[in-house]
Amino acid sequence: MTVFFILLYAVNINTMKLLTMIVMLGLSLFTASSVYDFKVNSLDGKLIDFTQYKGKTLLIVNTASECGYTPQYADLQKLHEEYGSKVVILGFPANNFGAQEPGTNKEIGEFCQKNYGVTFQMFEKVSVKGNDQHELYKFLKEKTGQEPTWNFCKYLVKPDESITFFPSKVKPMDKQILDAL
């Protein structure tokens, strides 16, 4: 009788492992096929469905409040105001580089509003590289072969879903970006 219970226990353990593997495989197989498949929380916790951006050019930027590139917020806002009919700016605060975005989502929002008058869409703080990389940034890396190397890297996503990567040193109002709009 003891052998029976040991066998039953072993079968149940193996069954659970198998089910766990199937679930994990299923989750890893479900990946976004389009940037418009994503849903991400804004700084104030509202779920933003990227289907609303379908057919629009997007500039996706990883941001930080305590970086030498932080003044690019001003250019991002200017781009939003002057070219908002051509491009949607999407800001993603990240603390991956030099711990230069230590604030909470609320603090980040207040900083952006107070110092740069930001009115473009800002999202909750995410990780843009490493083991905890956000799914959107995994997708962008997969499509371009490039991931952020520092704060204020940019991905320009065209309506045909072609994606161009721009490093931090390329400012939002740079000719390279304006010509690509």
Image: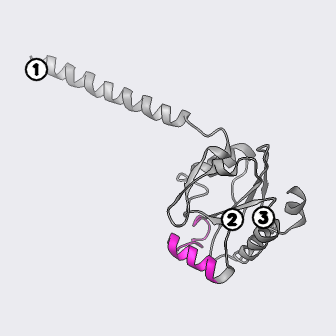
CB atoms of marks 1 and 3 within 8 Å: no
Q: Is residue 164 shown left or right of residue 33?
A: right
Secondary structure at numbered mark 2: loop
Amino acid carrying label 1: it is Thr
Look at mark 3 in the image and give the residue it sits on.
84
- Please name which of the two marks, 2 or 3, marks the residue nearer to the observer: 3
Look at mark 1 in the image and give the residue it sits on.
2
Amino acid carrying label 3: it is Gly
Where, quadrant-wise, is the N terminus in this rendering?
top left
Picture coordinates of residue 35 (x, y %)?
67, 46
In the displayed structure, 64 sits above or below 52; it is below
Picture coordinates of residue 9 (x, y %)?
21, 25
Q: CA distance from mark 1 to mark 2?
A: 60 Å
Residue placed at 59% from the left, 79% from the top?
111
What is the quadrant of residue 13 in the picture? top left
Numbered marks: total: 3
Where, quadrant-wise, is the C terminus in this rendering?
bottom right
Secondary structure at numbered mark 1: helix
Amino acid carrying label 2: it is Trp
N-terminal-most mark, 1 or 2: 1
Look at mark 2 in the image and give the residue it sits on.
150
N-terminal-most mark, 1 or 3: 1
Viewer-proximal residue, 137 or 6?
137
CB atoms of marks 1 and 2 within 8 Å: no
- Please name which of the two marks, 1 or 3, marks the residue nearer to the observer: 3
Q: CA distance from mark 2 to mark 3?
A: 25 Å
In the displayed structure, 25 sits above or below 122; it is above
Q: Which residues are magenta?
A: 94-114
Q: Residues within 10 Å of mark 3 (few under 14, many from 20)?
A: some
Residue placed at 82% from the left, 70% from the top?
82
Q: Is residue 109 magenta?
A: yes
